[in-house]
Image (cartoon, grey):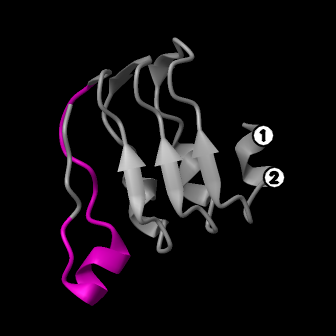
């Protein structure tokens, strides 16, 4: 909920915190986010479609969770014809 107050945040590392539940869609409002690390938690569900708005995102680590599905197409990967490398 309070993530929307941090639009200029560039790096977020919440790895290894045993966070349970789903990935909050509010993370898609972190427009300045370059690096997101959520590995080694107990996250479930899918990645919210709002993640496609993270135009500056260059690194996303989600492994060692119970996330299913795919990561929404990130706008910057389309513009530069890059593909993210994912592992779980």
What residue is drawn where x is 58% and y is 61%? 33
Tag 1 residue: 2
Q: Where does the magenta region start and end?
A: 67-83
Q: Label 2: state its secondary structure.
A: helix
Residue 15 at x, y = what percent?
51, 28
The residue sitting at 53% across, 64% down in the picture is 34
Do the numbered discs 1 and 2 sit on residues whose CB atoms are within 8 Å?
Answer: yes
Q: Quadrant of the C terminus?
A: top left
Q: Which residue corresponds to mark 2? A: 5
Looking at the image, residue 12 sits to the left or right of residue 40; the answer is right
Q: Tell whether 1 sits left or right of 38.
A: right
Vertical relation: 22 (above or below) 13: above
The image shows residue 44 at horizontal and vertical percentages of 35, 20
Mark 2 nearby-residue class (10 Å; few <14, some 14–19, many ≥20): few
- Tell me the crowding category of disc 1: few under 14, some 14 to 19, or many 20 or more residues within 10 angstroms, Cα based: few
Query: What residue do we see at 46% from left, 33% from top?
Result: 38
Q: Position of residue 12 (x, y in %)?
A: 61, 45
């Amino acid at each position: 909920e309070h993530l929307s107050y941090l639009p200029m945040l560039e790096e977020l590392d919440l790895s290894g915190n045993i966070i349970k539940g789903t990935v909050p869609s509010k993370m898609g409002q972190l427009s300045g986010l370059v690096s997101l690390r959520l590995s080694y938690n107990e996250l479930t569900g899918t990645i919210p479609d709002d993640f496609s708005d993270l135009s500056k995102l260059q690194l996303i680590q989600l492994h060692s969770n119970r996330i299913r599905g795919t990561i929404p197409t990130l706008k910057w990967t389309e513009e530069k014809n890059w593909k993210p490398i994912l592992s779980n």
